[in-house]
Amino acid sequence: MNRRRTAAFSLAAIVTLAIFLTWQRLEYIDYCKETSHDTYIWAVIEDSRGKHLAIETQDAKTWEELRKVHENKTRVYIGGIIQEYGNKWGFRFRPDTITLSPSPPKETQATIEQLSWNMSYWRSKGLVYIDSKVTEIHITLVVSNSTKT
């Protein structure tokens, strides 16, 4: 009887662990789809509903503002012009239009899901903003070891 109880408990623990690990992996895959990006310099923003979006900019001033928001753990409206993109949401902010604002017009404020659900409406607004916090900053250095002979 004791062996059966131990075997049943062990089996239940293994099944529970397998389910948990599968769930964790699926969450990670979903997160990767949310934060798809093209460049080596990018940040991840999180909206008020906990959804994530990668943003990219080559503008040094904007990048410094994003870094400060991340460092200070503050919320700010981050926006730009929407363009279609191959991530979970089907859009991103055009990198050359990324801007931060303490208080943009209400009619230009949305969540990531709202922008995704009706891109044509939000695209007609021009610059649109997401109430965000910067959760990640990424700078990948690419080192080339090329020797000329």
Image (cartoon, rainbow, N blue to C red):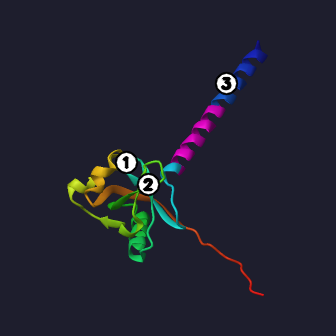
Q: Earlier in the sequence, mark 1 or mark 3?
A: 3
Q: Are marks 1 and 2 in contact (CB under 8 Å)?
A: no
The residue under label 2 is: 53
Q: Amino acid at mark 2?
A: Leu
In the figure, is residue 69 to the left or right of 144?
left
Magenta stretch in the rendered image: 17-32
In this rendering, which labeled residue sits more in front, label 3 or label 2?
2
The residue under label 1 is: 116
Image quadrant occupied by the N terminus? top right
Element class at badge 3: helix
Give the CA distance from mark 3 to mark 2. Answer: 37 Å
Can residue 75 be seen in the rendering of this structure?
no
In this rendering, which labeled residue sits more in front, label 1 or label 2?
1
Q: Residues within 10 Å of mark 2 (few under 14, many from 20)?
A: many
Q: Are marks 1 and 3 in contact (CB under 8 Å)?
A: no
Q: Amino acid at mark 1?
A: Ser
The reply to whether the magenta stretch includes residue 7 is no
Relative to the observer, which residue lies in front, 80 or 26?
80
Can residue 103 be seen in the rendering of this structure?
yes
Name which residue lies at 27% across and 54% down.
109
Name which residue lies at 54% across and 42% down.
27
Name which residue lies at 39% across and 76% down.
61
Q: Amino acid at mark 3?
A: Ala
Q: Residues within 10 Å of mark 3 (few under 14, many from 20)?
A: few
Query: At which x and y percent is residue 17?
Result: 65, 33
Image quadrant occupied by the C terminus? bottom right
Magenta highlight: main SS = helix
Give the CA distance from mark 1 to mark 2. Answer: 11 Å
Relative to the observer, which residue lies in front, 14 or 23?
23
Q: Hey, which quadrant is residue 40 in on the image?
A: bottom right
Q: Earlier in the sequence, mark 1 or mark 2?
A: 2
Tell me the number on the disc at residue 12: 3
